[in-house]
Amino acid sequence: MVQAINLALKEEMRRDKNVVLLGEDVGKDGGVFRISEGLIDEFGAERIMDTPLAESVIAGAAIGMALYGLKPVAEIQFMGFIYPAFDQIFSHASRIRSRSRGRFTCPIVVRTPYGAGIKAPELHSESTEAFFCHMPGIKVVVPSSPYNAKGLLIASIRDPDPVIFLEASRLYRSIKEEVPEGEYSIPLGKARIVQEGKAVTILAWGAMLHRTLQTIEDIDAEVIDLMTLSPLDEETILKSVKKTGRVVIVHEAAKTCGFGAELSATIAEDAMLHLKAPIMRVTGFDVVMPLPKLEDFYIPTAARIKKAIDEVMKY
Amino acid sequence: MPEKIIESCNIKRLEILDEKGNLDESLMPPLSDEQIKKMYELLALSRAFDQRALNLQREGRLGTYASILGQEASQIGSAFALEKSDWIFPSFREMGVYITMGYPLHMTYQYWSGDERGVKCPDNLNIFPVCVPVGTQIPHAVGAAMGVKYKKDKKAVIAYFGDGGTSEGDFHEGMNFAGVFKLPVVFICQNNHWAISVPREKQTASKTFAQKAFAYGFEGIQVDGNDIFAVYKATKEAVDKARNGDGPTFIECFTYRMSDHTTADDAIRYRPKEEVEAWKAKDPILRVKLFMEKKGLWSEKYQKEIDEKSKATLDEAVKMEEKIERPSPKDMFEFTYEKMTQRQMRQIKEL
């Protein structure tokens, strides 16, 4: 997936001179995950900007550049460090179009690795996508594979609105897939049916999609990879739920107010009468994300996913 | 090994026109009589605008408003040095800047009456909408300056903020970026001595705000913020420097907030009357009048003319503003994203 994201950046930067990168260690070092490796050699330090250690102004300066007509892609080194930039994203990126009644817009992409499973120090493993889904004006995209990472990133860079692009760090080097060279984009706001089925709908995104797929070999499940959390593709979800009548939602984030809550509520509002069983959520626990020795107990396990599926199948 | 001094910092203060209207000719920037009169008329208009806004607020015709009383020279003097093509990132107390740049007055009243359409900047200007969270506009100015530099444009970017704003993290991060990337940005800090109830002494232990620039590797200067010529000169030099690619400048305008923080505040609760009285003598408009009088540029008749002109301009602006119909409730959906989402399309029907 690292190469796919690198390729998307490279191709977009070749296509459009207004696309620039900024962030900590993104230049010479190629980023701590090597996402931008080699880009500084091709595009120079003018377009691949190594910045001081300052998340708020990385986001804020990206906003200023976007106002001026550039298409900045900002990297926040880990999602756990995005919070100083939270103010800029919420107070400005999300509302500039609205505040200026369309005179100014903010087509930025903020890329950041998220999620557990790489045995990293504290605050390197959280999955707090729901914060950003709660911000009108922001789009939230979570790719699950090299192919869709490239297509979704290209679409995000070309999108006229601010996009938070969350890359599961665990997938960077664990998922391999052929990725075509050249332009293709995957539209934002559309979910993908990974596997069709009739018995139960399973909703997942990012790294949890793979754990889910490993769990359900003998079940006639319809698996949906949301890919874009906001704006949400309600149509694909509801159509599937109306067909299967059973829903399991899998995410890494803590349960309370996690994005699964929004999905459950949406399904309850619009497809309640089609349900045969209660909606089940398999999520991280409502605890502080533990350090690596306990992280495998925190992340939803195959056994917990299986148990939830068995539970809904009882009805 | 002996210890040695490896760096030291000297801060200049610029004053050209004193409270009695006396001028230091040697420092006076080149300004024609016509330009001086224009500055004076903008000062008068801004003060009248401000007074009208306060009156309208009291009558319930405007919402909460942040007065610029006492800070007119800092705002008009700096904006007078800008080109229409420059980019301006204001805070929420910069109506003098908007007025100087030729922003439609009825739109500013429209904004303060609670209609966002009032800060939809006209296409011929680049003034960013009023920024409410303190100091958070500084990174935007820095980013826009990165854009100017990247595109090799000959423009300056100006960030306005107050003494309170310098305590925010975004101030530090933004100033640091500006120094590191040598950006074409001018930071204009109106040190009006009060951040709501927090006095300047509690905002920083530094002797001046200007010296903060030193730590970021670029020039900081203090000017008498009630001296329009000093503010103009410092800003003109700073924007010329920015346009020439010679990097950022920080200007501390040493001024005073004569009014309450906003119409929702009561400054009597926290600051001594004597202090306010003492600043009255330093009024930024009075000294220009005294200077012009000595130069033969001011007369009672002239004053009457400009007062009448200001009044007519404001009457017209208020009339235009009050004729504007309330935005349609659907309007709030229109600019969240470029295209409305499926969910929004359903919600709009609930209106």
Image (cartoon, coloured by chain):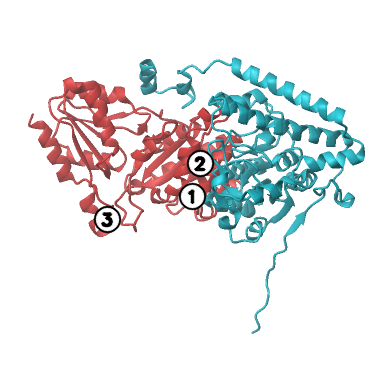
Chain colours: A red, B cyan
Which of marks 1 and 2 precedes in the sequence? 1
Query: Could you say which disc has been placed on residue B108 in the image?
Result: none
The three-letter amino acid code for the residue at tag 3 is Pro
Q: Nearer the viewer, mark 3 or mark 2?
A: 3
Residue at image point 34% right, 34% down: A227
Q: Nearer the viewer, residue B265 or B219?
A: B265
Q: CA distance from mark 2 to mark 1?
A: 13 Å
Residue at image point 37% right, 21% down: B342
Asked which quadrant contains residue B262, the reply is: top right
Disc 2: host chain = A
Query: If the image is split into quadrants, where does the N terminus of chain B sit?
Result: bottom right
| Secondary element at tag 1 | helix
Q: CA distance from mark 1 to mark 3?
A: 24 Å
Q: In this figure, which residue is indicated by the disc labeled 1?
A: A55
Q: On screen, A39 above or below B58? A: below
Q: Is the residue marked by circle 2 packed among few (<14), some (14-19), or many (20+) residues within 10 Å?
A: many
Q: Position of residue B167 (x, y in %)?
A: 55, 53
The three-letter amino acid code for the residue at tag 2 is Val
Q: Nearer the viewer, mark 2 or mark 1?
A: 1
Disc 1: host chain = A
Q: Is the residue marked by circle 3 packed among few (<14), some (14-19), or many (20+) residues within 10 Å?
A: some
Q: In this figure, which residue is indicated by the disc labeled 2?
A: A73
Query: Could you say which disc has been placed on residue A290 in the image?
Result: 3
Of all residues shown, which one is farthest toward the front? Answer: B274
Q: Nearer the viewer, residue A186 or A314?
A: A314
Q: Nearer the viewer, residue B342 or B276?
A: B276
